[in-house]
Image: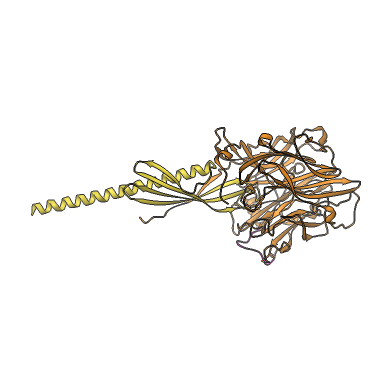
Chain colours: A orange, B yellow
Amino acid sequence: MTHRASRAGWTAVLLAAFAAASTHAAPLGTILFEHESGPSTLSVRIDGASIRGESRGNDGVWTLVVSKDGPRLETGSSTELVAGACDASLFATLSTDDADGDGRIDARRHERARLLVAANWRVGQQWRSAILAVELGAAGTATLAWRNDSTDMPALGRLAAAPARLTMPPAGDAGDAIIVAGGWPRSDMPVAGGSAGSLLAFDAATGRALPMLFTTDANLVSGVTMVDGDGDGATDRLYFADARWRVWRLDRTSSPPGATAAFFPTLFADLGTMAEPGAALQFAPDVALAEVGAPRMLEVALGSSDVPGSMALRHWLFVLSDPLPLQGAIDVAIASSPIRPSDLLPSGVAGKADEEVATASRGKVISLPGPLATAPITVAGHRLVATRASAGKDRCTLRVDEPELFDLLTLTPTFEQRSYRIGAERDAAFSLSRSTAADGRSSPRLVCALGSTPLPQCPRIDAVQRDYWVRKDAR
Amino acid sequence: MAALLVGDALRGATLDQALVTAMRDRQRAFETAEWGLAHAETSVRQWLPLEPADPVIVDDQSRAVVTTTLVTIDALPPGFSTGRVLARRLLATSEGRTSRGARVRLDLGLTRLEPAP
């Protein structure tokens, strides 16, 4: 956990932007990772079926291409970046892998600097998928650490979300698992029942398939959000949604470390009566600890977006309240009935009376102006939600850096709403970054962006706060 | 008798002077320690690497020894999305020292919010 980055290394970073793991990877991002030889930066760009990594100085250029024959990793700059980008039957999602949860992608000690990729390609009417771990070398070069194809995993569907690491104590690869929701059905043909409603786990070190964490009777199409509630570095909770608009929560029990099956499932919310045809809860829930209140309360925000090939008439954002125990693992399911739409307060008139009712309710439901474009994000108590303002554009007519219109909704802690229309990059994702001035010194401000477009609507964040001051010597 | 009174007054004045000097020295050590904390906070704000023991020379007669250590990483800071932002809890300790031997130690708890990878 020691900070080993050299000063020169830090100052070399003009804009260290970290894209958070979400169902849509950021189209552009700079990953700062550390090796024994020092810090390195890698520009990563994803467009449909291509993921391009390019380190500073071009000493490490590689492209992971998803083709009709599956994914392949190529080195050198000769590979076309947009190969397959206009083919909707080829796509990939990407996330970074912070093995020890220290906020850095690093390859020191037992860690490895890695990217996690879920790749999809279609053979006839059948979809095939693979989970890959791409290991970064000191100069930003890439090698394939491991790969697991769906042929080994009958339940693996058409993956919609990026993989994420489930951390078990002690931190590191031992006992950790890479988690991905089973996704859509493998076949384009309608299937009755189906077995893709599974939360899949892979050994973080080898990619070997582990026992599933959870199964249900509906496809798991959303990203998975991990929560470390007590700060011990281990995952305590998981939130995700299924195709029937049910939201599930898994709580870690006190089973021995390494047992990924030691999670207790709870139906947290059943929002099925508000399900819209052609819409699904596809993005990973945004989970944030409420700034005030006792007991500690998590706010889980998730919204609907269009199913590929469909266009729903209405879209919703749900903000659900969930109490968080103070310490340790949870042995017993928290006794409460699932949240239903009737438990939620429709967002509308602001005011004291409204706030009082909101406190008594189990959450809020808000009508969205369009389909969710990315997972919501909570910044300094404010929740930012981006929806697509221009639907139905053909991907092939747009370059990856061509702007698209988004409706940005800002919700204050009292649920006052403010709306803006902005132009940002296609397939944009919210990111938080710190900027560095020309003299190499970092700004103390965190910058909030949609894609690469900075958001002035984002609340100002003072990155350093004084918590306490005490005189320790005897007077 | 008068000589005794004068002598006693002189001793008292000398004692007062010594006490004032000691207090002034401690005050100087305190201000030096505060200076060190300000130095530590600036380093944290500028995202500079945490040095194990960083001496801060204030003047010829006073210096502060500053250490900034990581206490814990909070993956769930209130008001921020988990997995998107983390809070690094830091402890800055500054010991102000003067050439006359006064020492004052101050602790400062800091939180730095960082974008998660």
Quarter where residue A83 is shown: top right
Residue A292 place in picture, x, y as percent: 58, 53
Question: On the rendered image, what quadrant is the C terminus of chain A found in?
Answer: bottom left
Does B36 sit left or right of A392 as displayed?
left
Residue B56: x percent and y percent?
42, 43
Question: Can residue B43 be seen?
Answer: yes
Q: Residue A128: where, in percent of width, then height?
A: 85, 49
Q: Is residue A150 above or below residue A384?
A: below
Q: In x, y percent, where is residue A239?
A: 72, 55
Residue A327 magenta? yes
Q: In the depicted view, which residue is nearer to us: A91 or A302?
A: A91
Q: Is residue A290 magenta?
A: no
- Drawn side of residue A462 relative to residue A53, left or right: left
Q: Nearer the viewer, residue A419 or A20?
A: A20
For the point 20% across and 49% down, which residue is it?
A: B13
* Principal secondary structure, stretch drawn in magenta: loop
The segment highlighted magenta reads: A323-332
Can the viewer see residue A349 in this picture? no
> A88 or A145: nearer the eye?
A145
Q: Is residue A83 above or below residue A125?
A: above
| Left or right: where B1 falls relative to A224 | left
